[in-house]
Image (cartoon, rainbow, N blue to C red):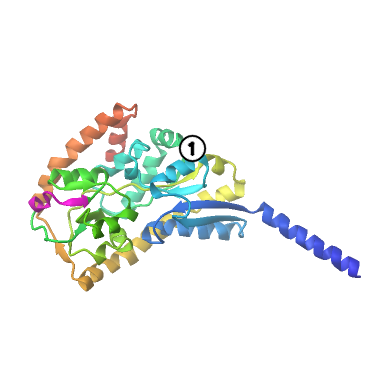
Amino acid sequence: MKKILGKLCLTAVALSFAGEAMATEWNVSLWGKRRAFTEHVEKIAELVDKKTNGEFKLNISYGGLSKNKENLDGISIGAFEMAQFCAGYHRDKNPSLTVAELPFLGVSTLDQERRLSEELYKHPAVVKDLARWNATLLMPSPMPQYNIAGLGDTPKSLDDFKGLAVRATGGIGQAMKAVGAVPTSMSASEVRQALDGGVIKAVAFAQHAHMAFGVVEKATWWTTNLNPGTINCPVVVNTDALNGLKPAYRDALLGSVDEALDYYVDNYNNKTMKRWDPLLKERGIEKVTFSDQAIADLKKAVATPAADQWVKDNAAKGLPAQELYDFFTGMIK
């Protein structure tokens, strides 16, 4: 009897190890901390785990696998299987995506931003661009139009931005430069230290990032309607890893994208945005609203020149830039 029980125990242990060996785990490289910007990644991990009965897991790391500006490099060498990054952090690595970061494109809602990005990610030139990094675009991280929070004297007109050192990337940086500000490109994780050290006096962010990276703890004013644009931050997967997944795991991953994005947009609209105005009031942060004419003049001065320069620069790199620009702006129209 003891021998039989012993054999059964050994068999159970063997089966347990076999089950563990069959499980698949992916490492996911994010940064900062869990926030509205990462909720779709958290959600897709939850959905994949549930759909595969725990056999396929996404292990999410906030900064433990890579620096945010190096996530695309990590994907390219297979250091991890999934990552989030922002195109504006390294424009030369992913020029096709930066068409979505041009200033004053006229995107007005998170759902519109989501749909535009999803279509952009399917464009052959974009697919080819990301393939250089062995990366497959999985889903966007739609964000609202950026606005600026700063400390010190409150700007009463756009002229008051002259000489202001502001964290602003991509097309938003071009808009800031047009009003005489001094745009500085840095990752979100570097912003609070730069504010504390006096390196910058203002920050262009979406609302969730102003909260998540401590800007509201320092700011004394915030622009309500500058709305110069946003940045494009996709979630990508290593192509070899994706192709190597069991069909059931692949289906669980790809089949969860829409639900994860629905959750993300709903969370941002109905939780994050509802916290914003009460937080400004609580901290005594002054709202700055510019006239319609001032915004129209800024848009006129910035939008067309920035688009023309983007097309020229990227066509010189071999990208079908005009085609991409027409494709993206055509969807907005």
Q: Quarter-wise, where is residue 309 in the image?
A: top left
For this orientation, the residue located farthest to the front is: 197
Asked if the stretch drawn in magenta spans residue 252, the answer is no
Above or below residue 78? Residue 159 is below
In the image shown, does 258 or 39 lie closer to the viewer? 39
Is residue 96 visible in this depiction of the protein?
A: yes
Q: Position of residue 278 (x, y in %)?
A: 24, 71
Answer yes or no: is residue 206 visible. Answer: no
Is 161 in the magenta?
yes
- The residue under the point 48% across, 43% down is 75
Q: Between 58 and 218, which is closer to the camera in this rendering?
A: 218
Residue 119, image x and y in percent? Answer: 38, 42
Identify the residue position indicated by label 1 in the image. 134
SS at mark 1 in the image: loop
- Residue 102 at x, y = what percent? 25, 42
Q: What is the span of residues highlighted in magenta in the rendered image? A: 158-166
